[in-house]
Amino acid sequence: MRATLARLFIYPVKSAAGIECERVELGPQGFRHDREWMIVDAAGRFVTQREEGRLALISTAIEAGRLHLTVPSGESAAVAVDHGGENVAVQVWSAHCSAFDAGREVSELLSGFLGRSLRLVRFDQSQQRLADERWTAGQTVPTLFSDGYPLLVLSEGSIADLATRVGHDLPVQRFRPNILLGGVAPYAEDAASILETGDARLQLTKACTRCAITTLDHVTGQRTGAEPLATLKSYRFDRDLRGVVFGRNAYALAGAGSILTRGAPASIIAP
């Protein structure tokens, strides 16, 4: 089945605003710089939009080798994308990882904006954090600070169909895909096994279970009610995964180092 790479995204800081890309480099851990940084509390535990919706209001940019964070007041801070720093122990879900503290300037920006002691950390890639091998056919699949898998694939048709059911538009930011497919029917990603584009060959794996982040208005940082989770639950509840599913997790089988380009043709291969 033919498709296009309609839109491409990276999310440098877990749960902060993402960056839409014209071109993005694929690596074994997903797209370059995707979820390479994470915000943690004083105990080193990850903080996400699940408990702090205002994280969605922190914009990110990567320019001239630096990661820039900007809060709604216009205040900003930046660090080198390859920064080191104090090595600290952090936690994302049940995984305990080593990371580099990004320093006082970014900490003060985040803490001042959210009113609590927070720090930004960068994944220490001298270690590995692995995706659950139950969903990777036993393969070793490294990831950084993602929820569990390097990539997330969704289609424009799936979002459009859900929006029709809900009764209003749903911005793509609510679903945080890395790859948004165009030119395919709604939920075509459900039946896919492989996604190929250029030299890249991606394995689609576990369906993505959804949470309250989908109910967040990314303009205000506030919850909007039960939608679209309530509607998704009515027709997208997976008993085995014990949750609402929308989109597919994925990882690279081949093509590490290749460049994916917005608008490029792709092929979806069913099992």
Image: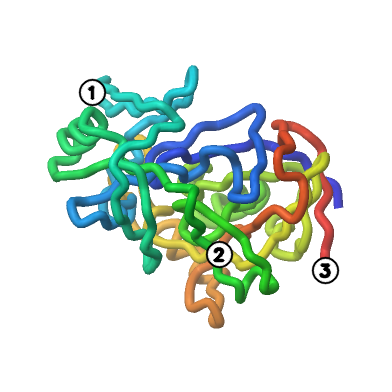
Q: Nearer the viewer, mark 2 or mark 3?
A: 2
Q: Residue at x 66, y 56 (%)?
A: 251
Tell me the number on the disc at residue 271: 3
Task: Give the camera-side residue of 205 and 3.
Answer: 205
Tell me if I can see residue 244 in this picture: yes
Q: Which kind of residue does numbered mark 3 sit on?
A: Pro
Q: Is residue 129 above or below residue 240?
A: above
Mark 2 and mark 3: Cα distance apart in space: 21 Å
- Point out residue 69 in the picture as x, y percentages from the top left corner: 34, 28
Dot 1 surroundings within 10 Å: few (below 14), some, or many (20 or more)? few
Mark 1 or 3, nearer chain start:
1
Dot 3 surroundings within 10 Å: few (below 14), some, or many (20 or more)? few
Q: Residue at x 82, y 38 (%)?
A: 265
Q: How is the image coloured?
A: rainbow
Q: Which residue is mark 2?
A: 131
- Point out residue 25 in the picture as x, y percentages from the top left corner: 65, 36
- Point out residue 249 in the picture as x, y percentages from the top left corner: 61, 59
The quadrant in which residue 100 appears is top left
Q: Which kind of residue does numbered mark 2 sit on?
A: Ala
The local secondary structure at tag 3 comes to: loop
Tell me if I can see residue 171 in this picture: no
Q: Residue at x 54, y 63 (%)?
A: 130
Mark 2 or 1, nearer chain start:
1
Q: Which kind of residue does numbered mark 1 sit on?
A: Ser
Q: Nearer the viewer, mark 2 or mark 1?
A: 2
Direction from residue 139 to residue 236 in the image, left or right? left
The local secondary structure at tag 2 comes to: loop
Q: Which residue is mark 1?
A: 73
Q: Is residue 96 above or below residue 143?
A: below
